[in-house]
Amino acid sequence: MTLRTAVIGLALGTSFVFLQSGESFATDPAPEQQYTTANTLALPLFRQTPESGESTVSTQINPAEAESPTEPVTTPAPAPVHKPDILATSAIAYGSYQTDVSTFKRSLESAEEIDNVMNQLGTHNASRLATGWLSYSALLASQSEPFKKGVLETEAYFGRDRLLLGMQNSPSYTLSLDGADDAINRALRAGKADANRLETVGEEIKEQAYTLQTLGWAKAKLRGKPSEHAQQLRLASLQGRPQSGAVRSMFISPNINDTLQDTHRLSGSQTLWDQITQTGSELKLPGLPGLQLSRSQHSVRAERRESAGNIATLAALKILGETEVDNSAYVSRALQDPQTQACFEKAQLNLLQCVSASRNVYERPFCIGVHALKEVGECIGEVSN
């Protein structure tokens, strides 16, 4: 494919309207997220394991030690600090969700366990989850060498300003650059594998809603008002789940590119989240260098071309170093992909409606399996055919 000589003018806008009940969802970013390796969040109307207290460190200074030294003290220059870019920090929210999917108790044996799973999977912030997935996909796409070459050659030929203008005018403009097919296929392949994973786990949880109907404790009426349960979930989701400390360590690591390259070696049925093993606060990928390079190919669905274009745009911005700029308007615009945001928010809305409509304990696993897992997987997997 040769370099395009024209930059698309104004992109066609697309508006989305979907039914909401009750209060609307807030999509503005919340304050900076706390992160933890425990991943617990207490809700007033759901039982939850209490969090452990934090230790404190004394900061008192001995007066004798506070005296000024007689000899001048030379302060060494601080060591260079690795600053993770916007995509890396944003992707932590998606990685934390996938970590919760990996670690929650699958076999539900009590009402308390069902409450805990609902807290774990049902309180992720939909907007940050959407931007987290877009960021993770873009990080994978940015590892494509043919795409890097295409982006840099386009910049050299047209200039950065015209290249950025093309991205601004049309979300799908970047898909026309040389190497874009290879880049977007990396993201789509990982997305399809993640979607299949959520579909499998979600179906397993949904089926328990039917098998639990034969058990006395599961046939019991829910305590309190379901509408109040839904309201508590909604409020908790506005704050969002705490970040996984292990996932945070992985994405802000200077070696994150090595991990992303290893992810490209996974087959279409494997995901990064399946392969990760946790050791303290570190995440390691066991044996990935020996895996064969996946050759599966995916094409973009026409209905989700805008989402694919924003993934490619974010990947190009990463290559250009724009994702290291604070408050980049180009990055912010691509991260707020309306198709992706609407899909994740609709899944969260459907979960709250399901919780509000449930009356017996056994109905809650259905809500979790269908709306907190399977529908999220559809938002990810339906970008490709």
Image: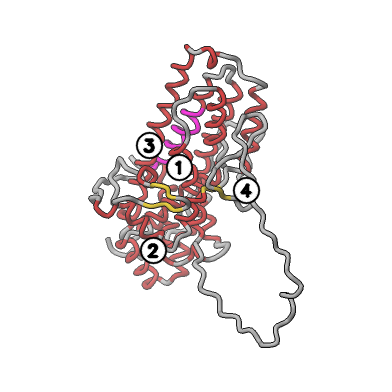
- Residue 173 placement (x, y as % from top left): 41, 56
Rendered position, 206 above or below 161? above
Task: Report the amino acid beneath label 4.
Answer: Asp
Residue toward you, 334 or 72: 72
Q: Which residue is mark 3?
A: 197
Left or right: where does residue 225 sit relative to residue 378? Answer: right
Label 2 Cα crowd, 10 Å radius (few <14 / some 14-19 / many 20+): few
Q: CA distance from mark 2 to mark 3?
A: 41 Å
Q: Amino acid at mark 2?
A: Ala
Q: Which residue is mark 2?
A: 6
Pinpoint residue 196: horizontal percent, then vertical percent. Answer: 36, 36
Q: Residues within 10 Å of mark 1 (few under 14, many from 20)?
A: many
The residue that disc 4 covers is: 28
- Circle 4: is it few (<14), some (14-19), or many (20+) Cα within 10 Å? few
Estimate the spatial distance between the alpha carbons at disc 3 and disc 1, rounded to whole Å.
10 Å
Please state which amino acid type lies under the numbered disc 3. Arg
- Image depth: mark 4 or mark 3 in front: 3
Q: Earlier in the sequence, mark 4 or mark 1?
A: 4
The answer to the question of whether label 2 and label 1 lie on touching residues, with beta carbons closer than 8 A, is no
Q: Secondary structure at mark 1?
A: helix
Which callout, 2 or 3, points to the residue nearer the camera?
Answer: 3
Residue in the image at 64% along x and 52% along y:
55
Residue that numbered label 1 is attached to: 98
Verify whether residue 212 appears in magenta.
no
359 w.r.t. 8: above or below: above
Q: Main secondary structure of the magenta part?
A: helix
Residues drawn in magenta: 368-383
Estimate the x, y position of residue 374 in percent, counting from the top left.
44, 32
Q: Determine which quarter of the picture holds residue 261.
A: bottom left
Q: Nearer the viewer, residue 113 or 383?
A: 113
- Determine contact: label 4, label 3, CB under 8 Å: no
